[in-house]
Image (cartoon, grey):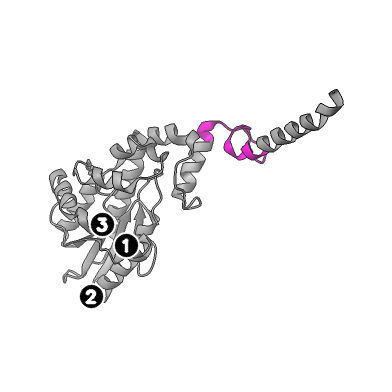
Protein backbone atom coordinates (compact mmCIF):
# COMPACT_ATOMS: atom_id res chain seq x y z
CA UNK A 1 0.00 0.00 0.00
CA UNK A 2 2.92 2.27 0.83
CA UNK A 3 4.23 1.68 -2.67
CA UNK A 4 0.90 2.65 -4.19
CA UNK A 5 0.86 5.95 -2.27
CA UNK A 6 4.31 6.96 -3.48
CA UNK A 7 3.13 8.47 -6.83
CA UNK A 8 0.48 10.49 -4.98
CA UNK A 9 3.05 11.78 -2.49
CA UNK A 10 5.45 12.74 -5.28
CA UNK A 11 2.65 14.52 -7.12
CA UNK A 12 1.76 16.56 -4.04
CA UNK A 13 5.41 17.38 -3.45
CA UNK A 14 5.84 18.64 -7.03
CA UNK A 15 2.66 20.72 -6.75
CA UNK A 16 3.82 22.25 -3.48
CA UNK A 17 7.23 23.07 -4.97
CA UNK A 18 5.62 24.70 -8.00
CA UNK A 19 3.34 26.77 -5.76
CA UNK A 20 6.32 27.92 -3.71
CA UNK A 21 8.17 28.98 -6.86
CA UNK A 22 5.16 30.90 -8.13
CA UNK A 23 4.87 32.75 -4.83
CA UNK A 24 8.52 33.87 -4.73
CA UNK A 25 7.61 37.12 -6.54
CA UNK A 26 4.80 37.71 -4.08
CA UNK A 27 7.06 38.51 -1.10
CA UNK A 28 6.32 35.22 0.66
CA UNK A 29 9.97 34.19 0.44
CA UNK A 30 10.97 37.52 2.03
CA UNK A 31 14.00 37.75 -0.27
CA UNK A 32 14.78 39.44 -3.55
CA UNK A 33 16.20 37.51 -6.48
CA UNK A 34 19.67 38.65 -5.38
CA UNK A 35 19.12 37.18 -1.95
CA UNK A 36 18.46 40.50 -0.20
CA UNK A 37 16.14 40.03 2.74
CA UNK A 38 13.18 42.35 2.42
CA UNK A 39 10.04 43.20 4.36
CA UNK A 40 6.50 43.62 3.13
CA UNK A 41 6.97 47.38 3.50
CA UNK A 42 10.07 47.21 1.28
CA UNK A 43 8.14 45.28 -1.34
CA UNK A 44 5.13 47.62 -1.37
CA UNK A 45 7.26 50.76 -1.36
CA UNK A 46 9.17 49.36 -4.35
CA UNK A 47 5.89 48.57 -6.10
CA UNK A 48 4.58 52.11 -5.49
CA UNK A 49 7.82 53.73 -6.64
CA UNK A 50 7.88 51.71 -9.85
CA UNK A 51 4.29 52.75 -10.58
CA UNK A 52 5.39 56.38 -10.31
CA UNK A 53 8.43 55.70 -12.50
CA UNK A 54 6.10 54.16 -15.09
CA UNK A 55 7.88 50.81 -14.93
CA UNK A 56 4.69 49.12 -13.73
CA UNK A 57 1.86 49.81 -16.20
CA UNK A 58 -1.67 48.71 -17.03
CA UNK A 59 -2.38 47.30 -13.57
CA UNK A 60 -6.07 46.87 -12.77
CA UNK A 61 -5.78 46.53 -9.00
CA UNK A 62 -3.26 47.25 -6.28
CA UNK A 63 -1.65 43.99 -5.10
CA UNK A 64 -3.69 42.59 -2.22
CA UNK A 65 -0.72 42.51 0.13
CA UNK A 66 -0.06 46.23 -0.51
CA UNK A 67 -3.59 47.61 -0.07
CA UNK A 68 -2.95 48.67 3.53
CA UNK A 69 0.37 50.26 2.64
CA UNK A 70 -1.10 52.25 -0.27
CA UNK A 71 -3.98 53.37 1.92
CA UNK A 72 -1.56 54.65 4.54
CA UNK A 73 0.51 56.43 1.90
CA UNK A 74 -2.33 58.35 0.19
CA UNK A 75 -3.61 59.53 3.59
CA UNK A 76 -0.17 60.40 4.92
CA UNK A 77 1.91 63.52 5.35
CA UNK A 78 4.38 62.01 2.88
CA UNK A 79 1.77 61.98 0.12
CA UNK A 80 1.01 65.65 0.81
CA UNK A 81 4.71 66.52 0.82
CA UNK A 82 5.30 64.63 -2.44
CA UNK A 83 2.37 66.42 -4.07
CA UNK A 84 3.38 69.83 -2.77
CA UNK A 85 6.93 69.33 -4.04
CA UNK A 86 5.55 68.71 -7.53
CA UNK A 87 3.59 71.96 -7.37
CA UNK A 88 6.59 73.86 -6.01
CA UNK A 89 8.57 72.73 -9.05
CA UNK A 90 5.75 73.99 -11.27
CA UNK A 91 5.95 77.37 -9.56
CA UNK A 92 9.73 77.54 -9.92
CA UNK A 93 9.40 76.74 -13.62
CA UNK A 94 6.61 79.31 -14.08
CA UNK A 95 8.71 81.97 -12.37
CA UNK A 96 12.03 81.25 -14.06
CA UNK A 97 11.44 79.15 -17.15
CA UNK A 98 8.35 80.57 -18.85
CA UNK A 99 8.71 83.52 -21.17
CA UNK A 100 4.99 84.17 -21.37
CA UNK A 101 3.75 85.83 -24.55
CA UNK A 102 1.10 87.88 -22.83
CA UNK A 103 -1.00 87.92 -25.98
CA UNK A 104 -3.76 85.51 -25.01
CA UNK A 105 -1.96 82.43 -26.34
CA UNK A 106 -0.35 81.29 -23.08
CA UNK A 107 -1.97 78.11 -21.75
CA UNK A 108 -1.56 75.63 -18.93
CA UNK A 109 -3.40 72.30 -18.75
CA UNK A 110 -4.69 70.51 -15.67
CA UNK A 111 -6.27 67.12 -15.24
CA UNK A 112 -9.07 67.10 -12.64
CA UNK A 113 -9.30 63.92 -10.55
CA UNK A 114 -6.43 63.58 -8.09
CA UNK A 115 -4.95 66.72 -9.58
CA UNK A 116 -7.41 69.48 -8.62
CA UNK A 117 -9.72 67.40 -6.43
CA UNK A 118 -9.25 64.08 -4.67
CA UNK A 119 -10.89 60.69 -5.22
CA UNK A 120 -9.18 59.22 -2.15
CA UNK A 121 -12.49 59.20 -0.19
CA UNK A 122 -14.04 57.03 -2.91
CA UNK A 123 -11.08 54.67 -3.11
CA UNK A 124 -10.96 54.40 0.67
CA UNK A 125 -14.27 52.55 0.39
CA UNK A 126 -12.84 50.40 -2.40
CA UNK A 127 -9.63 49.13 -0.79
CA UNK A 128 -7.50 51.99 -2.09
CA UNK A 129 -7.39 50.44 -5.54
CA UNK A 130 -7.35 46.86 -4.32
CA UNK A 131 -10.85 46.35 -5.68
CA UNK A 132 -11.42 46.35 -9.43
CA UNK A 133 -12.96 49.61 -10.61
CA UNK A 134 -16.70 49.80 -11.10
CA UNK A 135 -17.09 52.81 -13.41
CA UNK A 136 -20.82 53.15 -12.77
CA UNK A 137 -20.19 53.28 -9.04
CA UNK A 138 -17.37 55.80 -9.44
CA UNK A 139 -19.46 58.08 -11.63
CA UNK A 140 -22.33 57.91 -9.13
CA UNK A 141 -19.87 59.14 -6.48
CA UNK A 142 -18.59 61.90 -8.79
CA UNK A 143 -22.14 63.03 -9.50
CA UNK A 144 -22.53 63.96 -5.82
CA UNK A 145 -19.87 66.68 -6.31
CA UNK A 146 -18.27 66.09 -2.91
CA UNK A 147 -14.64 65.42 -3.86
CA UNK A 148 -12.34 67.42 -1.54
CA UNK A 149 -9.84 69.95 -2.80
CA UNK A 150 -6.13 69.36 -3.30
CA UNK A 151 -5.12 72.70 -1.90
CA UNK A 152 -1.52 72.68 -3.14
CA UNK A 153 -2.79 72.65 -6.75
CA UNK A 154 -5.16 75.54 -6.07
CA UNK A 155 -2.13 77.71 -5.25
CA UNK A 156 -0.68 77.07 -8.70
CA UNK A 157 -4.08 77.51 -10.33
CA UNK A 158 -4.52 80.97 -8.77
CA UNK A 159 -0.95 81.99 -9.59
CA UNK A 160 -1.47 81.11 -13.24
CA UNK A 161 -4.67 83.16 -13.33
CA UNK A 162 -2.82 86.12 -11.81
CA UNK A 163 -0.18 85.82 -14.56
CA UNK A 164 -2.85 85.93 -17.26
CA UNK A 165 -2.39 82.33 -18.38
CA UNK A 166 -5.42 80.58 -19.87
CA UNK A 167 -6.23 77.49 -17.81
CA UNK A 168 -7.56 74.49 -19.73
CA UNK A 169 -9.05 71.56 -17.83
CA UNK A 170 -8.95 68.28 -19.75
CA UNK A 171 -10.52 65.31 -17.99
CA UNK A 172 -11.34 61.71 -18.83
CA UNK A 173 -14.69 62.30 -17.14
CA UNK A 174 -17.63 61.86 -19.49
CA UNK A 175 -19.71 64.76 -20.74
CA UNK A 176 -22.70 63.71 -18.63
CA UNK A 177 -20.74 64.73 -15.51
CA UNK A 178 -20.22 68.34 -16.63
CA UNK A 179 -22.69 69.97 -14.22
CA UNK A 180 -21.49 67.94 -11.23
CA UNK A 181 -17.84 68.61 -12.13
CA UNK A 182 -18.36 72.38 -12.35
CA UNK A 183 -20.31 72.36 -9.09
CA UNK A 184 -17.60 70.42 -7.31
CA UNK A 185 -14.76 72.59 -8.61
CA UNK A 186 -16.49 75.86 -7.78
CA UNK A 187 -17.56 74.87 -4.29
CA UNK A 188 -14.00 73.96 -3.28
CA UNK A 189 -12.52 77.18 -4.68
CA UNK A 190 -11.68 76.77 -8.37
CA UNK A 191 -13.09 79.36 -10.75
CA UNK A 192 -11.95 81.35 -13.73
CA UNK A 193 -10.68 78.58 -15.97
CA UNK A 194 -10.87 79.21 -19.71
CA UNK A 195 -12.20 75.86 -20.89
CA UNK A 196 -13.39 72.58 -19.40
CA UNK A 197 -13.10 69.67 -21.83
CA UNK A 198 -14.76 66.34 -21.05
CA UNK A 199 -15.07 63.20 -23.16
CA UNK A 200 -17.82 63.13 -25.75
CA UNK A 201 -19.34 59.81 -26.90
CA UNK A 202 -16.96 59.97 -29.89
CA UNK A 203 -13.97 60.52 -27.59
CA UNK A 204 -14.92 57.44 -25.56
CA UNK A 205 -13.91 55.29 -28.53
CA UNK A 206 -10.30 56.40 -27.99
CA UNK A 207 -7.84 55.61 -25.27
CA UNK A 208 -7.44 58.41 -22.74
CA UNK A 209 -3.90 59.24 -23.85
CA UNK A 210 -5.00 59.60 -27.48
CA UNK A 211 -8.07 61.63 -26.53
CA UNK A 212 -6.03 64.12 -24.52
CA UNK A 213 -3.32 64.37 -27.17
CA UNK A 214 -5.99 65.12 -29.79
CA UNK A 215 -7.40 67.90 -27.60
CA UNK A 216 -3.94 69.40 -27.18
CA UNK A 217 -3.40 69.26 -30.95
CA UNK A 218 -6.56 71.30 -31.46
CA UNK A 219 -5.36 73.83 -28.89
CA UNK A 220 -1.93 74.17 -30.51
CA UNK A 221 -3.46 74.43 -33.98
CA UNK A 222 -5.63 77.19 -32.59
CA UNK A 223 -2.54 79.18 -31.61
CA UNK A 224 -1.97 78.23 -27.98
CA UNK A 225 1.48 77.80 -26.41
CA UNK A 226 1.12 75.05 -23.80
CA UNK A 227 3.67 75.96 -21.15
CA UNK A 228 2.84 73.17 -18.72
CA UNK A 229 0.67 70.17 -17.97
CA UNK A 230 -0.12 68.78 -14.52
CA UNK A 231 -1.76 65.39 -14.01
CA UNK A 232 -1.64 62.30 -11.85
CA UNK A 233 -1.61 59.86 -14.81
CA UNK A 234 0.94 59.43 -17.57
CA UNK A 235 -1.96 59.39 -20.05
CA UNK A 236 -2.49 63.06 -19.14
CA UNK A 237 1.03 64.15 -20.03
CA UNK A 238 2.22 61.77 -22.77
CA UNK A 239 1.47 61.86 -26.48
CA UNK A 240 2.08 64.53 -29.08
CA UNK A 241 1.87 67.45 -28.92
CA UNK A 242 2.76 67.83 -25.26
CA UNK A 243 3.51 70.83 -23.08
CA UNK A 244 6.89 72.50 -22.83
CA UNK A 245 7.08 70.93 -19.36
CA UNK A 246 4.99 68.18 -17.79
CA UNK A 247 4.54 67.45 -14.09
CA UNK A 248 3.31 64.16 -12.63
CA UNK A 249 1.53 64.08 -9.27
CA UNK A 250 1.71 60.85 -7.24
CA UNK A 251 -1.10 58.32 -7.54
CA UNK A 252 -0.53 54.60 -6.92
CA UNK A 253 -4.24 53.71 -6.61
CA UNK A 254 -5.14 53.22 -10.27
CA UNK A 255 -3.82 53.40 -13.82
CA UNK A 256 -5.66 55.16 -16.64
CA UNK A 257 -4.73 54.68 -20.25
Tell me where residue 168 appears, x and y as whole percent: 22, 61
User: Which element carries disc 3, helix, strand or loop?
Assistant: strand
Residue where numbered disc 2 is placed? 222
Q: Residues within 10 Å of mark 3 (few under 14, many from 20)?
A: some
Q: Nearer the viewer, residue 8 or 46?
A: 8
Tell me where residue 128 appears, x and y as whole percent: 38, 38
**Residue 50 makes an appearance in the image:** yes
Q: Estimate the spatial distance between the alpha carbons at disc 2 and disc 1, rounded to whole Å.
A: 23 Å
Q: In this image, 119 relative to 56: left or right?
A: left
Q: Earlier in the sequence, mark 2 or mark 1?
A: 1
Residue 162 versus residue 215 in the image, above or below: above
The magenta span reads 21-42
- Residue at the (16%, 44%) spot, across then down: 188
Contact? badges 3 and 1 (CB < 8 Å): yes
The image quadrant of residue 251 is top left
Q: Earlier in the sequence, mark 3 or mark 1?
A: 3
Q: Earlier in the sequence, mark 3 or mark 2?
A: 3
Tell me, for residue 204, which label it has, or none: 1
- Residue at the (30%, 61%) spot, across then down: 228
Tell me where residue 215 appears, x and y as whole percent: 28, 67
Query: Marks 2 and 1: which is nearer the front?
Result: 1
Residue where numbered disc 3 is placed? 174
Q: In this image, 118 relative to 63: left or right?
A: left
Amino acid sequence: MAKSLLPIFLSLLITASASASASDWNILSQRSKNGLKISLKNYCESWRLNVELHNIRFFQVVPEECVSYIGKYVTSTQYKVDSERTIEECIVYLSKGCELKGDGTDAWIFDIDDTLISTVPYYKKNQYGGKKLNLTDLEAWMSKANAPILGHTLRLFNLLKARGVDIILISARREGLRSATIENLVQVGYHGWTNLILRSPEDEKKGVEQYKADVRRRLVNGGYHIWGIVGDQYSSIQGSPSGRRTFKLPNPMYYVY
